[in-house]
Image (spheres, rainbow, N blue to C red):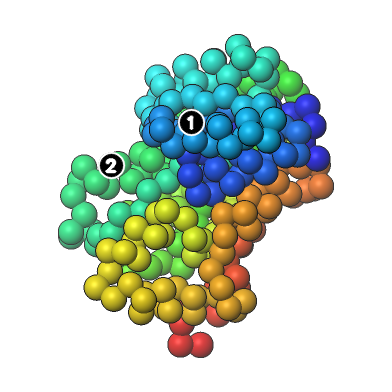
């Protein structure tokens, strides 16, 4: 489905990013793995190479313009082009606007939103050299349904949703840009959040209640949706969002439905 394509995937060290990278290489894409965690990124790289996939790891802080620019240049030097960009990198610390420090706010916005801007800024010119391209941005269910005590995260993901629409408008018809809005996905980030709660088991039950399908999502569920948006199978889709949330959006996120 992606034979001959070159993909850049941020946040590729774990969770959705790792699952997407593995899925894309299985479909024939060469993949540039971007993550600031070298150990995690190398683990993903080894998993792909065990399956004889073609990938390289680039240690990069995607909220830093100079590092992103260098990463994009390095990918082009290695693979000759960039066809697909999947912006996955993200963090989700707790906090209201009162309890969130300015430094934490800047970190969340930088990691979740500015990274999408920067990676797109430097990748789009390379896509235009090829003549076309596809960008998939990871927003969240939180982009449209706010969660308590997640002010910075909610704001950052809402920004991703609108930035996606703006880029689709500005860069079509050559480049398609869409977003994914996952619900609760069983990633290391979610595991950490659950473990920090006073009653982890009760938290798990509450999280499961956000799904109409009786289970939490898996990273592979989101990776499959990313593959669809990255492929020619979605050739008439741009500027929109696909919800990968087990139906959470259908009932407004109210566990007491």
Q: Is residue 212 above or below residue 159?
A: below
Residue beneath label 2, please?
106
Q: Of helix, strand and loop, which one carries label 2?
A: helix
Q: Residue at x 49, y 75 (%)?
A: 208
The quarter in which the N terminus is drawn is top right
Left or right? Give the position of 132 relative to 155.
right
Q: Total number of numbered labels?
A: 2
Q: CA separation, marks 2 and 1?
A: 27 Å
Q: Nearer the viewer, residue 89 or 17?
A: 17
Q: Residue at x 72, y 39 (%)?
A: 26
Q: Nearer the viewer, residue 219 or 183?
A: 219
Q: Of helix, strand and loop, which one carries label 1?
A: helix
User: Which badge, 2 or 1, comes first in the chain's sequence?
Assistant: 1
Q: Residue at x 47, y 55 (%)?
A: 187
* Rendering coords of residue 16 (x, y %): 54, 49
* Rendering coords of residue 234 (x, y %): 78, 48
Q: Residue at x 34, y 58 (%)?
A: 192
Left or right? Give the position of 65 relative to 7.
left
Q: Nearer the viewer, residue 57 or 66?
A: 57
| Residue 161 visible here | no
* Rendering coords of residue 62 (x, y %): 42, 32
Q: Is the residue under label 1 in contact with that under label 2 (CB below 8 Å)? A: no
Identify the image quadrant of residue 148.
bottom left
Identify the image quadrant of residue 66.
top left
Residue beneath label 1, please?
42
* Rendering coords of residue 19 (x, y %): 59, 46
Q: Is residue 134 above or below residue 108?
A: above
The residue positioned farthest toward the front in the image shown: 50
């Amino acid at each position: 489905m992606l034979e001959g394509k070159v993909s850049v995937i941020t946040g590729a060290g774990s969770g959705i990013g790792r699952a997407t990278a593995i899925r894309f290489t299985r479909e024939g894409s060469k993949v540039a793995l971007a993550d600031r965690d070298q150990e995690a990124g190398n683990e993903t790289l080894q998993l792909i190479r065990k399956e004889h996939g073609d990938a390289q790891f680039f240690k990069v802080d995607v909220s830093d313009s100079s590092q992103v620019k260098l990463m994009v240049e390095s990918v082009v030097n290695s693979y000759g082009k960039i066809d697909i960009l999947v912006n996955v990198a993200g963090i989700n610390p707790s906090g209201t606007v009162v309890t969130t420090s300015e430094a934490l706010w800047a970190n969340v916005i930088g990691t979740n939103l500015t990274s999408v801007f920067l990676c797109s800024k430097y990748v789009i010119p390379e896509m235009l050299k090829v003549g076309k391209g596809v960008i998939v941005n990871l927003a969240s269910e939180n982009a449209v349904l706010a969660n308590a005590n997640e002010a910075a995260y909610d704001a950052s993901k809402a920004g991703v949703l609108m930035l996606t629409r703006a880029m689709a408008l500005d860069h079509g018809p050559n480049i398609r840009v869409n977003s994914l809005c996952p619900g609760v996905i069983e990633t290391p980030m979610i595991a950490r959040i659950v473990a920090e709660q006073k009653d982890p088991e009760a938290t798990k039950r509450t999280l499961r209640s956000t799904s109409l399908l009786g289970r939490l999502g898996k990273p592979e569920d989101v990776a499959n949706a990313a593959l669809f948006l990255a492929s020619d199978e979605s050739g008439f889709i741009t500027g929109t969002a696909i919800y990968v949330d087990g139906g959470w959006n259908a009932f407004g996120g109210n566990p007491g439905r």
